[in-house]
Amino acid sequence: MRFAAAAGLVCALAVCCALAPGVALADDGVFCGAGGAVELSSSSHVRMVAEEVVFDCTDPKLAHVSCLFVVVNEGPADTLLIGFPDYWPNTQDDRSVGDGASALRDLLIMVDGETIIPEAKPVVSAPAGSWNQAHVWTCTFAPGQTRVLRTEYRHVYSATTSASHVVDYILKTGATWAGPIGLVVLRIKPGELRLKEPGYPPNWDYTDGEYHWRTTNLEPTQDIFVGMGSPRQYADHLIGYWSHARDSDDARREVREFGFLHSSAPEFLDEVLAALPDSLPRLRRFLEDLSAERKAELRR
């Protein structure tokens, strides 16, 4: 399998190179693409036994993502072209904020502790609007060899109309390695942010100031998408709206229709409630009722 990371996420992915036919990908030696482009391929015997991805959201403007992948060659000696996805926007795209054309900042790739200088290549048949480039490098594997791949970068947050900060990560490219991913550990260091819309994966544990998710033998079929938000900022928004409403009944009706509230996890609503002053008892009761409704919905 190879793991991929797109603009704003991380991953090490297996790709075929359409350059000189001297680089063997897995045992089949098939090369994909033309004119120096690459595309996703697969390995039949190099397996990802573990990965850990840490999303550090303590900077409200840039997420710092650190990835660690442990891969093992369970077959004969091989040379793979491994790649890391990226999004290169056109000049009219306001996401052009990375290093040069890249949407990533401070990209660092290491293999067994040694820094690798990859080569950026356009990707054939890349998902539209998701990623269109890959930073690729060759990696040799002796029979039975274990290699440790590390990727780090910073990236601006994605956003939605209901969540101010979105943590997203291309996980499906992990299926390009052989078999399932043995162990997957995801961690979010939220800073002042809190999990607002779990998305995928849906069930996170919150301990010691971090969100954690863990699974084994994963065949990735979905990408990570998690909506985060600042309870303090959402509370300030509600306070501002409530104070300018015509009367409390109108405010209650209209606030109830705010989509960002109904898409929120009840735990996030409780955090917003905790940020509201006692001087707004009706608004506080409204949030209490809405949180109770959301909890009842999830129990059904």
Image (cartoon, grey):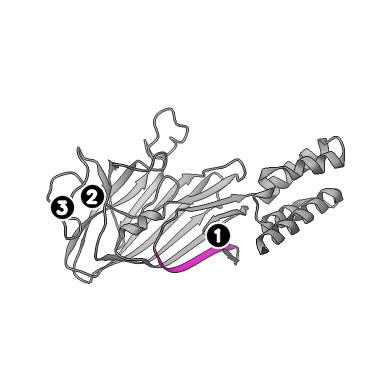
Image quadrant of residue 211? bottom right
Q: Residues within 10 Å of mark 3 (few under 14, many from 20)?
A: some
Chain part drawn in magenta: 209-218
User: Between marks 1 and 3, how big is the CA–CA gap?
Assistant: 40 Å
Decide which of tag 2 and tag 1 comes sooner along the chain.
Answer: 2
Drawn side of residue 49 relative to residue 44, left or right:
right
Q: Name the foreground residue: 156 vs 72.
A: 72
> What residue sits right under mark 1 in the picture?
202
> What residue sits right under mark 2 in the picture?
16
Please tell me whether mark 3 sits on a helix, a strand or a loop: loop
Please tell me whether mark 1 sits on a helix, a strand or a loop: loop
Drawn side of residue 84 relative to residue 75, left or right:
right
Decide which of tag 1 and tag 3 comes sooner along the chain.
Answer: 3
Q: Up-down: is 24 above or below 247?
A: below
Q: Nearer the viewer, mark 2 or mark 3?
A: 2
Q: Up-down: is 56 above or below 104?
A: below
User: On the rendered image, what quadrant is the N terminus found in?
Assistant: bottom left
User: Between marks 2 and 3, how big is the CA–CA gap?
Assistant: 9 Å
The residue at 85%/49% (across/down) is 282
> What residue sits right under mark 3 in the picture?
23
Please tell me whether mark 2 sits on a helix, a strand or a loop: strand
Extreme residue toward the front, this view? 300
Q: Residues within 10 Å of mark 2 (few under 14, many from 20)?
A: many
Mark 2 vs 1: CB contact within 8 A: no
User: On the rendered image, what quadrant is the C terminus found in?
Assistant: bottom right
Q: Which of marks 1 and 3 is in front?
A: 1
Type of amino acid under label 1? Pro
Drawn side of residue 190 relative to residue 80, left or right:
right
The residue at 75%/59% (across/down) is 292
Type of amino acid under label 2? Cys
The residue at 46%/65% (across/down) is 185
From the image, give the main secondary structure of the stretch colored magenta. strand
